[in-house]
Structures are given as C-alpha cells and as structure tokens.
Image (cartoon, coloured by chain):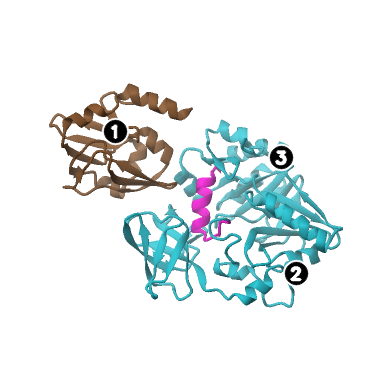
C-alpha cells in the first residue's frame, strides 16, 4: 500500500500521472513535464512536497543538540525564522540526510527532512537525543502538508491567495521564514527560482492548492521538480550523495563547518579523509542524454568517474549532469561518457546551470 | 485510445505500415509515447543498415527515460525521418505520423507474425491490469 499525501485526490482530479516514489503515490506530471518546467522558470508553478517531513525539536538544549547533530553550524542562526541547509552525518562522515533547519526560538527548532529517509532520520535523531539531550521533545509533524510555490511570480500569487500575507512576508530574505495565521511560510525552494515553501494544516491543503490554481499557479510534478533542481545544481539525496559518500566529495563543502572549534558527528572522519573526488557539472557536446550511473573516462591516467544525476535541460535545450570526478579534473576539460555502445564528449563546467530563469553557462 | 486499423503492431509497441510500393514504415505507438512522456532525443539507424527482426535498432529518450526500439521485421533501412533529430516532440504530437525509419522488407512474410489493431488493443488492456 503506497503512502499518500493530503493532496492525493486533488492530484487525481487534475489528471496527474501518478508514480510510486519511494513508497509514496506522487504526481509525476499533469500532462507535460516540459510545460511545467517552463512555467516555473517563466511564471509560477507548485509542487506537493508533503511527503517530506517537518520535525519539531523542542527543549532548552535544542541548540547545543543540533550543534552536535549537524555538519553545518546552527550558531549561524541568530534571528527567529532564519533557516540553514545542512547535512546530518554518520560517525564515518557519510551523509544520513540533507535537511533544512529553522530557528524559531531558543527552545524550538524545526527541521525538514527527505521523504525516503524520514523514518531512518527520526530513529537516528531520537537515539542521539537519548544520549545527548534526554529532555528534548522530537515531534514528527505528519499533521502538516507542504506546498512549494516557485517561479518569478510565485510570491505575488501567494499574496493574492492568503489575504494579508504580503505585509508579513514581503521583507523575508532568502532562507527566512515566518508564521502567518495557520501558514508557516519560508522563502526557500528547490528550483533555482524565487518563491515560498509553505507548511499548513493537512486538512486545509486541498482548498489552498485549488485557490493557488485559480490564481494561475500551474500544478507541477516530480518530473519537473527533478529537471529544475538539476539545472539549479541542487543535490538530490540518494543520487548525488548518501551514507557511502562524504559531503566534501558531493559538492557540499560549503555546508560543512570545519573551521570552528565545534565538534559534530562525522567531523573527525572528514578531517582524516581529504577529498579525492569532487562533484562537478557536465554539458553534453554530442547528441544524446546523460543519465545517472553512466561511466566517465578522463584524460588523467584514464581515471574514471560517474554521473550522479543527469538529464535533459529544458531551459538550455541540451543534456546536463552532475558527476563525481577525480579532483584533478577542472572546468573546461573534456571527458568521455559511456552511453550504451558509444563514447560521447562532454565539457566539464561549474554549476549551477540556471538561476532565476537565466542560463549561467 | 484510437489504434489505427491500417497498421500492424508489436508487443514492444512499434507500429508498421506496409506501403503500396512494398516498403514498410516504422514508428512507436501512441501508448509508448504516453508511457515515456516528453521526448527529447531520438537515435535512428543509418540508411543502408540491415536489420534483423527483433534487433535493437533505435533509441528514443524522453525527459524520464531511454527506450530501445526493436525492428518489427527484417530488412534494409532505406530512409530515416531526420526531422526527429531536431524535433523529437513530433512523436508526442502524433505518434502515428512521426515515423522513425522505412525498411525494404527482407521477407514480406515477417508482417504476418505482427498484430492487428484488435490484438494490440488486447495487449494494452492486459498491461493495464
């Protein structure tokens, strides 16, 4: 039996093509994945991301606990509503999950974790809580739905739908959230466009979705979500990193605080294992489509690499990828990708590929 | 879903049209394009290549996945639809108009083993269950 979000029937009413996504019955697209992609880049689209899980962490030791639990430093969070992207590492330095932490008060932090890892995350966090901070309350919030509204016109359309929300949210900076009425509104996303991710009571989600639809926000499925995040150069857990890879070899060094004195789970392992590989971008020069797990041959002693996420970029109209390659490789190099029985040429580039509707290539 | 009655079909969702001049035109079905979603790439066999029935001979790729196309009958490739190289979305727009390639059949009897529209319809119904 697949798990369903509070919007399952709403998607079906909109003729979504539904797929099994890690045990969840989710919309892949509502007709055309490409149209949905372009709508987000040019106007506004929305995604049901209620399969992801918000977890409230409450108690006086919330901050010291997260300081140890996460690879990024929650001491960067000094203003209520501020958010921080971080990995949660195993003692071996592997990535258990990537997540966003919101600082609400000194005794209330909220994290949002991936769907496929949620059960594992909760078990891990509870076990660490029992060791480090037994007084903390860890509360999974399956009572909340989550809708991401993304695109250059996303915020304005949310303001039309939630009366009075403009005043409350127009000064929000990126990675900042505020509670307004029954909504928890964060200026975050997974597309490289402006917009909000909004948590709200599950029962209210269908009406809110339909109101956004009436305001001209296009429903968009997991297919477009994946091409948008790939263009935006954002990692996907389980593809670009997992428990067998460390964040320094996954393009996530910027999220790991190794400079401060602070100790955190996985720090020692990272210090003992300098990165030998890197996550970097590829543009396909020949015709074809790059896909995850395709092998790559480099000019450096024929050292190999592998595509972690690949696909067709609707904005650039060519195929792009994130790839794990030896550290010697640098932007501008040409590599060979093994695609079926052919070797295709690809150019190594820095990512992101697209931001705010514009090509960065 | 309308399945044209003037075509022959395979279980792997190719269609074949026998032309008046004895050549055969080949594409993928409406059902196949629906499963794959928005097409972004098509790799079509070269003119002159001799194909054996059942051989992997082309690849169509959508935003979602790559799919092999199998030769429905044996024969020599005599023409390819080059338009699909720049506009693979034609397959989504009309799968029965956006042909991939034309063959000169090696044995016209190969066609007898293919399905008619009614049998193909039954295959689709059984896949849906």
Q: Is residue B28 left or right of residue A109?
A: left
Residues at discs 1 and 2 both on one chain? no
Residues at discs 3 and 1 both on one chain? no
Q: Which residue is mark 3?
A: A202
Answer above or below: position of A66 versus A202. below
Seen at 19% across and 47% down, the residue is: B49
Q: Which residue is mark 2?
A: A75
Crowding around mark 1 (Cα neighbors within 10 Å: few <14, some 14 to 19, many 20+) is: many
Residue B17: horizontal and vertical position, in percent? 23, 31
Which chain does the numbered disc 2 sit on?
A
**What distance separates the C-alpha of mark 3 from that of mark 1?**
46 Å
In primary-sequence order, the first of circles 3 and 2 is 2
The residue range painted magenta reads A218-237
Seen at 44% across and 66% down, the residue is: A305
**What distance separates the C-alpha of mark 3 from that of mark 2?**
32 Å
Residue A299: horizontal and vertical position, in percent? 37, 73
Seen at 38% across and 38% down, the residue is: B33
């Amino acid at each position: 039996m697949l798990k369903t979000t509070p919007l399952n029937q709403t998607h079906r009413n909109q003729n979504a093509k539904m797929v099994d996504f890690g045990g969840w019955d989710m919309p892949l697209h509502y007709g055309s994945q490409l149209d949905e992609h372009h709508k987000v880049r040019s106007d506004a689209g929305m995604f049901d991301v209620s399969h992801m899980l918000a977890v409230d962490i409450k108690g006086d030791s919330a901050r010291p606990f997260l300081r140890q639990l996460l690879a990024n430093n929650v001491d960067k969070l000094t203003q209520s509503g501020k958010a921080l992207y971080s990995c949660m590492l195993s003692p071996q330095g592997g990535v258990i999950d990537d997540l966003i932490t919101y600082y609400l008060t000194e005794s209330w932090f909220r994290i949002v974790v991936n769907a496929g890892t949620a059960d594992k995350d909760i078990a891990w966090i509870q076990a660490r809580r029992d060791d480090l901070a037994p007084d903390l309350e860890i509360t999974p919030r399956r009572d909340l739905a989550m809708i991401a509204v993304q695109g250059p016109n996303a915020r304005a359309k949310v303001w039309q739908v939630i009366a009075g929300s403009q005043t409350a949210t127009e000064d929000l900076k990126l990675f900042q959230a505020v509670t307004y009425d029954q909504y928890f509104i964060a200026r975050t996303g997974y597309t490289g466009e402006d917009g909000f991710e909004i948590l709200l009571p599950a029962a209210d989600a269908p009406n809110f979705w339909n109101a956004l639809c009436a305001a001209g926000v296009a429903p968009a499925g997991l297919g477009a979500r994946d091409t948008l995040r790939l263009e935006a150069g954002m990692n996907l857990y389980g593809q670009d990193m997992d428990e067998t890879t460390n964040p320094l070899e996954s393009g996530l060094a910027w999220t790991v605080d190794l400079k401060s004195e602070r100790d955190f789970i996985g720090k020692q392992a990272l210090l003992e294992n300098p990165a030998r590989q890197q996550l970097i971008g590829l543009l396909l020069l020949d015709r074809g489509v790059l896909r995850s797990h395709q092998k790559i041959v480099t000019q450096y002693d024929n050292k190999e690499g592998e595509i972690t996420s690949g696909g067709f970029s609707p904005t650039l109209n060519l195929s792009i990828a994130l790839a794990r390659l030896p550290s010697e490789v640098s932007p501008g190099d040409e590599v060979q990708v093994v695609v079926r029985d052919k070797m295709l040429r690809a150019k190594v580039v820095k990512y992101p590929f697209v931001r705010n509707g514009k090509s960065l290539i | 879903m309308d399945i044209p009655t003037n075509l022959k079909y395979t279980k792997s969702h190719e269609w074949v049209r026998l032309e008046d001049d004895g050549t055969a035109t080949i594409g993928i079905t409406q059902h196949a394009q629906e499963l794959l979603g928005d097409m972004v790439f098509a790799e079509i066999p070269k003119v002159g290549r001799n194909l054996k029935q059942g051989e992997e001979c082309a690849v169509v790729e959508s935003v979602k996945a790559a799919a092999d196309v199998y030769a429905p009958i044996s024969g020599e490739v005599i023409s390819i639809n080059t338009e699909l190289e720049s506009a693979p979305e034609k397959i989504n727009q009309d799968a029965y108009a956006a042909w991939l390639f034309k063959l000169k059949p090696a044995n016209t009897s190969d066609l007898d083993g293919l399905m008619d529209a009614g049998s193909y319809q039954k295959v689709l119904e059984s896949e849906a269950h």
